Image (cartoon, grey):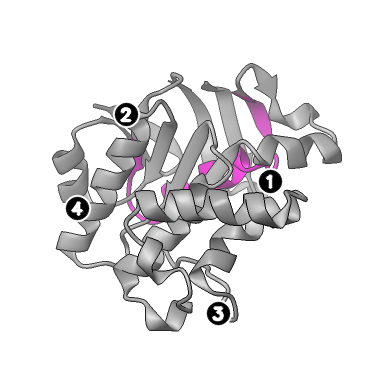
Amino acid sequence: MIETRHLSKFYHRGVYALRDLTLTVEKGEFVFITGPSGAGKSTLLRLLLRQELASEGELLVNGQDLATLSRPAIQEYRRGIGFVFQDFKLVPSRTVLQNVSFVPEVLGVPVAAQHRRAFQVLKWVGLQHRIGAFPEELSGGEQQRVAIARALVNDPALLIADEPTGNLDPDLSLEIMNLFREINAGGTTVLVATHDRELIRFVGRRTVHLDQGRIAEVM
């Protein structure tokens, strides 16, 4: 599903965030991307979201070269991706239901269908009873579950998470990882960037270790 070929990203003065990265993630796979701060994890995710372009090499998703996408094609491509952030990024003035409905709303889905789908995914993450609550009324774990529901509402083929448990305690972190395992068991490709080695051991999936923008080890 994801293929990088000698992928590099550098910024001013030739500082490389990624260097000569060649990697394949199969459809339906669950893969961790790990490494110390500055290793290139977040840069890789930004490239996958087409927020930035590679400096060298190729990045393909489902055989499609992301460098060749037109602006409309970028928007269409992103509709097939769910993204979960470390800091949740919920809209404070919107209820749980409205936060999750935001993506189908932007896509022009009728209101009744928006709410029906949002309720379905909120029920799946165990928050159907909090649909009228605002983010400030939720715990950190509940906010992250809402963020996951929002990422899933459009039924993405690929789910990307950037340090999704960074603001959660160990028990909640394990709950979130169990959700990701269930999502993956349903056929969604899952890519998680994290520095938490305990979580990686708990989940037990293929792990790509980055160091200074290069692949140091694949386990």
70 left or right of 91?
right
Q: Is residue 71 above or below residue 169?
A: above
Which residue lies at the image location 44% right of the left edge and 19% below the top edge? 26
Segment tinted magenta in the rendering = 32-60
Circle 2 residue: 185
Question: Dot 4: what SS?
Answer: helix
| Residue 210 horizontal/vertical position (percent) | 37, 39
Residue type at tag 4: Leu
Which of the two labelled residues, at mark 3 and mark 1, occupies the earlier sequence position? 1
Circle 1 residue: 52
Question: Dot 2: what SS?
Answer: helix
Which of the two labelled residues, at mark 2 and mark 4, occupies the earlier sequence position? 4
Residue type at tag 2: Ala
Q: Along the line of sight, which residue is nearer the eye, 176 or 197?
A: 176
Which of the two labelled residues, at mark 1 and mark 4, occupies the earlier sequence position? 1
| Residue 178 horizontal/vertical position (percent) | 24, 45
Q: Is residue 155 above or below residue 22?
A: below
- How much space separates mark 2 and mark 1, taking CA atoms? 30 Å
Which residue lies at the image location 59% right of the left edge and 81% below the top edge? 93
Circle 3 residue: 92
Residue type at tag 3: Pro
| Residue 202 horizontal/vertical position (percent) | 14, 42
Judged by depth in the image, the label closer to the viewer, 1 or 4, is 4
